[in-house]
Amino acid sequence: DVSEEEYKIGFSQAMTTDNWRREMNKAMRVESSMHPGLKLEIKDAGNHIAKQITQIDEFIKEEVDVLIVSPIQSIPITPAIEKAMNAGIPVIIIDRKIEGRNFTAYVGADNMEIGRNAAKYIISHSKGEAGIIEITGQEGSSPAYERSIGFKNTLDSVPGLKISHSIKGDWEKASIKDQLSTHLDSVEAPDYIFAHNDRMAMGAWEVARSKSLEDEISIIGVDGLFGPNGGIQMVKDGLLDATLLYPTGGAEAIKLAEELLRGESVNKYNILRTVVIDSVNVDIMQNQFDKLNQQQNDIEQQQAVIDEQIKTYNTQSDLIKLMLVL
Ligand code: FRU
């Protein structure tokens, strides 16, 4: 363990406006609380590239022992990561990638596989003929690019399955609702919509619903988050036909950091598993996440108690020191 010394991990998070990223942060906090020697600091870039670069610079100046980064976009963040590497700080990239291979380790699911699995789902559920709309994530971020490639390549193997239209989103539903609405007014309803995440998939469902098309269009999303507005609930409620699990990797990133601090060598690419969540397995998945969530909450509560005890202990030992001096 790394409990002998204090180590500082800096995490540059792209933004924290959505639950998926809040879950990632939570998983990181829970995992690092289990290693007493680790101190985790999270900086939120608020989806501003310039801010993310500045925050990475701050972490370099603070001389963090490990830097974890979830880049907003690949190309503009790459030089900032190189700077950290040149300063001798190991860098773990999580979820979205940078350009090239100048980083210590990557952790995240295979986004090409996610695209392929979405296509395979359509192939096995349609009778070889279907109209499909794709709604993509933010341009320049690697999951959007890779999900598209995987999706298109797999669909190409079936002549009757064509993407009739593509809509460019930015990961949030507000970016796609008007575009989809206008498009649906001018064409026959598609059989499938593949949205690159569940929040945009929810937007697609709202548009379909407003045109009474929700029963005609099958919607597939990505993320499969647990909780009230998450993909698992949307599959349960029949809003989505399926979602592809996209694990946040928060706990795994901290584990990797800990291994690096112990001087162990780690794999460069740490690929997390994805799975299709649909009506067949949604209850099992919900039960699993329910358990995991309870465990995480227990750990967080215990950590709060321990922090309180440490505070009391510190005040008491300060008092004793004072008494000894007197
Ligand atoms: C969260 C998110 C997820 C998506 C991921 C891609 O901010 O938009 O919904 O799967 O980022 O990086």
Image (tube, rainbow, N blue to C red):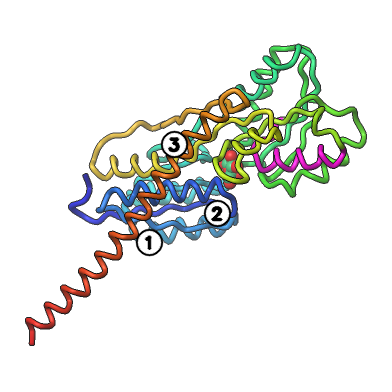
Query: Disc 3 and disc 2: Cα gap in Å?
Result: 19 Å
Quickly name the residue at label 3: 107
Choose mark 3 or mark 2, whichever is in front: 2
Category of crowding for the residue at label 3, using alpha-carbon neighbours closer than 10 angstroms: few (below 14), some (14–19), many (at least 20): many
Q: Amino acid at mark 1?
A: Lys
Q: Is residue 299 left or right of residue 169?
A: left
The residue under the point 66% across, 40% down is 137
Residue 73 in view, yes or no: no
Q: How many marks?
A: 3
Q: Amino acid at mark 3?
A: Val
Tell me which segment is drawn in magenta. 194-211
Give the image location of residue 115, x and y in percent: 62, 26
Of the image marks 2 and 1, the number of the one nearer the N terminus: 2
Q: Please, what secondary structure does the residue beneath circle 3 have?
A: strand
Q: Please, what secondary structure does the residue beneath circle 1 have?
A: helix
Q: Please, what secondary structure does the residue beneath circle 2 have?
A: loop
Residue extending farthest to the bottom is 326
Tags 1 and 3 in contact by the CB under 8 Å rule?
no
> Looking at the image, is 310 positioned above or below residue 85?
below
Quickly name the residue at label 1: 61
Quickly name the residue at label 2: 16
Of the image marks 3 and 2, the number of the one nearer the N terminus: 2
Q: Is residue 205 magenta?
A: yes
